[in-house]
Image: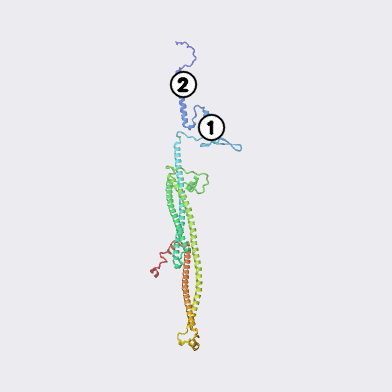
């Protein structure tokens, strides 16, 4: 038979389990709850950005509202009084329907498509490197083309300068030949004049122009070597950059056009239509734009600017030398022509003087002959037997008249005085005639010298006009100049030939 337990006293706590047992269960539950919250929070944190972790001291709905507030569209007031909603700036996906733009989401753990994502990222890196290498190669190739163009311009200008230098040297040969030809003049015509001074001045100016043109040729030669070396360096760098580009799906000019820069070297070129182009990246030893490429492009830019200045200077010098040489040659020819006119004027005066002297000499000779005849008539015949009776001083009429002492006739003394006076006049006329003949001979020689001087100056002017023609080259002008000095007599073998 069961034993009945007496009923216990009524207590306030109706729970049967003990307090320790309940506290143990609560402790286990609390630990599990904390572990669940921590693991859930950590799991969510691994899949969310850092700034999305909420503050544990702030309510969840308030944290979310504060977190998504920057994502919402912004309302701007227009001038007309209306409003315009715009998404916030920055990266992200624009949700036009919800009027929100959440930022880009970055995961902390690899996603299931991690392998594909890394493959795509590697492909993007490779493609970016290929694009950078292609752009650098395009820049190097364009710089090489510009250097080649500048080389062609410089070579063309060097040819023009060399032709002008040849003309200057030909001018020196013509000047030397002109001096030698003027050495053929007689001694009386070799008096230094303005024509000789003009020839000396022309020689000095031509030597100065020759030195100037030779300096331009040396400078351009040095610049040509520098440009050729820079071109080879650009070609090597371009070939090296193109090693990372197997397939060229578009030309290099198109690459530069897409970059918004026609050239990184030629700054004087007309800019492209695009308002802004890509800036030059900093040199990177392991990147696509290496320091060697940067140095080559900087050197190309410097050489292009220097070559442009050199081309302008050489062109200006060539034009100045051509104009100055023509002016000097024209002035020398004008001075020689003036000397020819003066010589011709003196020739005409001498010719007129010679004509007058010939008439005077003829009259003097005729007068001298008449005086000789008169002297012979006055003196009478040589033999006394040839005298007529009326010519004898002892004829009967005279003897009869002179029988007295004071009746002497002056016929004999008068005949002697007349003969002596006539002889003195004859001697004076002969002396004058000798002086006239000597002066006539001297004047004839001077006239001959003037003719030779005129012909020499005419030949010099003709030679200068013929030799300075552009079709006359330097070698043809050089054949006219020899080592023979006109002041020395010619050699016998040359005379015999």
> Label 2 crowding class (10 Å Cα cut-off): few <14, some 14-19, many 20+?
few
* Nearer-N-terminus badge (2/1): 2
- Residue that appears at 51% across and 70% down: 349
Circles 2 and 1: CB atoms closer than 8 Å:
no
Residue 136 percent across, percent down from the top left: 45, 45
The location of residue 315, given as percent across then percent down, is 48, 55
Residue occupying the point 46% across, 17% down? 19
**Element on which disc 2 rests:** helix
* Quarter the C terminus occupies: bottom left
Q: Nearer the viewer, residue 260 or 472?
A: 472
> Mark 2 = which residue?
26
Which SS class for mark 1? helix
Residue 343 position, x and y percent, is 49, 67
Gap between marks 2 and 1, in whole Å? 40 Å
Q: Which residue is mark 1?
A: 69
State how the image is colored.
rainbow
Task: Residue at the far front: name it.
Answer: 405
Determine the residue positioned at 49% across, 56% down: 320
Residue 323 vs 46, above or below: the answer is below
């Amino acid at each position: 038979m069961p034993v009945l337990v007496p009923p216990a006293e009524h207590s306030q706590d109706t729970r049967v389990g003990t307090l320790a047992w309940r506290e143990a269960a609560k402790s286990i539950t609390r630990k599990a709850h904390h572990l669940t919250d921590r693991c859930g929070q950590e799991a969510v944190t691994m899949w969310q950005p850092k700034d999305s972790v909420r503050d544990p001291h702030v309510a969840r709905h308030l944290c979310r509202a504060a977190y998504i507030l920057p994502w919402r569209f912004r309302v701007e007031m227009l001038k007309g009084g209306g409003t315009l909603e715009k998404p916030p700036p920055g990266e992200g996906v624009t949700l036009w329907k919800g009027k929100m733009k959440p930022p880009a989401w970055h995961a902390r753990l690899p996603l299931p498509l991690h392998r594909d994502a890394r493959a795509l990222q590697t492909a993007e890196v490779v493609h970016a490197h290929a694009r950078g290498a292609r752009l650098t190669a395009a820049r190097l190739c364009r710089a090489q083309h510009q250097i080649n163009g500048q080389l062609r311009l410089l070579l063309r200008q060097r040819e023009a300068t060399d032709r002008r230098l040849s003309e200057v040297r030909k001018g020196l040969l013509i000047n030397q030949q002109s001096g030698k030809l003027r050495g053929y003049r007689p001694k009386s015509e070799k008096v230094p004049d303005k024509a000789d001074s003009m020839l000396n001045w022309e020689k000095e100016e031509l030597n100065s122009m020759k030195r100037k043109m030779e300096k331009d040729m040396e400078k351009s030669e040095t610049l040509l070597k520098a440009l050729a070396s820079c071109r080879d360096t650009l070609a090597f760098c371009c070939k090296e950059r193109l090693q990372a580009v197997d397939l060229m799906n578009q030309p290099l000019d198109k690459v530069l056009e897409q970059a918004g820069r026609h050239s990184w070297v030629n700054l004087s070129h007309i800019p492209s239509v695009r308002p802004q182009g890509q800036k030059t990246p900093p040199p990177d030893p392991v990147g696509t734009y290496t320091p060697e490429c940067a140095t080559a492009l900087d050197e190309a830019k410097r050489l292009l600017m220097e070559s442009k200045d050199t081309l302008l200077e050489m062109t200006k010098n060539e034009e100045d030398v051509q104009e100055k040489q023509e002016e000097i040659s024209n002035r020398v020819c004008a001075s020689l022509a003036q000397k020819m006119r003066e010589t011709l004027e003196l020739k005409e005066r001498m010719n007129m003087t010679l004509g007058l002297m010939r008439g005077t000499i003829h009259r003097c000779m005729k007068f001298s002959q008449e005086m000789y005849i008169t002297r012979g008539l006055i003196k009478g015949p040589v033999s006394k037997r040839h005298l007529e009776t009326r010519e004898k001083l002892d004829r009967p009429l005279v003897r009869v008249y002179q029988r007295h002492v004071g009746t002497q006739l002056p016929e004999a003394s008068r005949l002697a005085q007349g003969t002596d006076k006539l002889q003195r006049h004859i001697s004076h006329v002969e002396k004058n005639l000798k002086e006239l003949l000597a002066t006539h001979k001297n004047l004839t020689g001077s006239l001959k010298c003037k003719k030779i001087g005129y012909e020499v100056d005419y030949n010099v002017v003709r030679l200068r006009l013929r030799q300075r023609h552009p079709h006359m080259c330097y070698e043809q002008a050089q054949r006219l100049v020899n080592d023979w000095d006109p002041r020395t007599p010619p050699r016998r073998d040359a005379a015999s030939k």
